[in-house]
Amino acid sequence: MTITAPAYGSDHSGLVCGYLFGRGHQPLPIETDAAREWLGQPGHHEGEFLWLHFNLANTASEKWLKEHCTLAEEFYESLHEGQRSTRIEMADNALIAVINDVVHDFSFDPSDIASLWLSVDRQLVISARRQPLKAIEGLRQAVRGGEPIRSPVELLTHLLRDQADALVKIVRDAIGRVDGIEDNLLAGKLKRRRANLGALRRVLVRLRRLLAPEPAALFRLLQRPPGWVADDDREELRQATEEFAVVLNDMASLQERIKLLQEEIAAQVNESNNQSLYVLTIVTVLALPINIIAGLLGMNVGGVPMAGDPMGFWVVAGIVAAFTAVAGWLVYRKQQDQE
């Protein structure tokens, strides 16, 4: 009986896909054995670089990387960190990036956000994730389709722009949901919309906190990039981060809009509660005379007036009606004064 180890969408070494750039107009798909052979060669042609994408859910991935790739220790340390905001920094003349992305079929659940780790140097790009993510899959499809990419930094820039595009779609979907809630609010159909807005706002806050690049690390990188990064690549990276900042500003505006809607809904709920309490108070005031008189006449003591009078009931009813009318008139006057 042969037992097959789970592949987790990758080969035995954890490789999901690999591409070799610089040997023609189209990137060449490459498998584990060919990648190991390429990495073992002492020198490579100028402009040639390799991209390997790994699935960390396969435990063989990290072992293979340590055996066949010379990566900065900061890269391996970042693999075991908790979830942090997106950052790109330099270590051992290479770029180490931690990019938070959303999974496929994102449903505005905080658990649908996961991290992607990258190591980028002059001739080798390593990317690794634990579950399928939208932006890296978009980059993979673009490379598979033959989109020309001339440098490792351009590959990273393409990934950032794919992530920004995915975030734009999320913001558009969120705006559609907020528009629907706002329409229901204007139509007077509150129901559970306040809770829906709260959940949506919490997810957007988490997305913005995790997806926003750390300004300090990015500023240091753009000011002092590695020597092998060309000026064109640095400018492309700067533009990609600026585009990302625009999307984050749109998300911040949407959060402010949700906050205003929450305040409007809270004001309507408070007004409805106050109106209910006001009606209850009026009913209590109008019922006060009959309750007092009924309590007095219902005491089992001697000397109850009109106990033997055949017209006693109607006399007491008249007294109650008179007091109730006076109480109702006082409530009416007070309401008129307030208006």
Image (cartoon, rainbow, N blue to C red):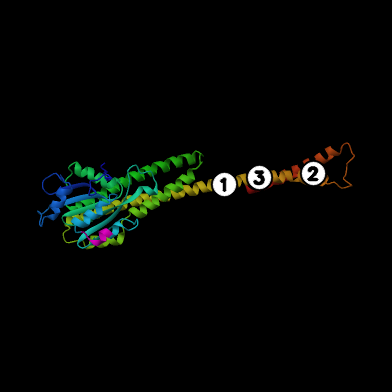
Residue picked out by circle 1: 271
Closer to the camera, 138 or 212? 138
Tell me the element at label 3: helix
Q: Earlier in the sequence, mark 1 or mark 3?
A: 1
Q: Which dot marks residue 294?
A: 2
**The residue stretch that appears in magenta:** 71-76
The kind of residue on which mark 1 rests is Glu
Q: CA distance from mark 2 to mark 3?
A: 20 Å
Residue at left 38%, top 52%?
206
The residue carrying pointer 1 sits among few (fewer than 14), some (14 to 19) or many (20 or more) residues within 10 Å by Cα, namely few
Q: Position of residue 7 (x, y in %)?
A: 26, 45
The residue carrying pointer 2 sits among few (fewer than 14), some (14 to 19) or many (20 or more) residues within 10 Å by Cα, namely few
Image-based side of 106 in relation to 159, left or right: right
Q: CA distance from mark 1 to mark 2?
A: 35 Å
Disc 1, disc 3: CB below 8 Å? no
Image-based side of 53 in relation to 171, left or right: left
The residue carrying pointer 3 sits among few (fewer than 14), some (14 to 19) or many (20 or more) residues within 10 Å by Cα, namely few
Total residue callouts: 3
Q: Which dot marks residue 280?
A: 3
Image-based side of 334 in relation to 304, left or right: left
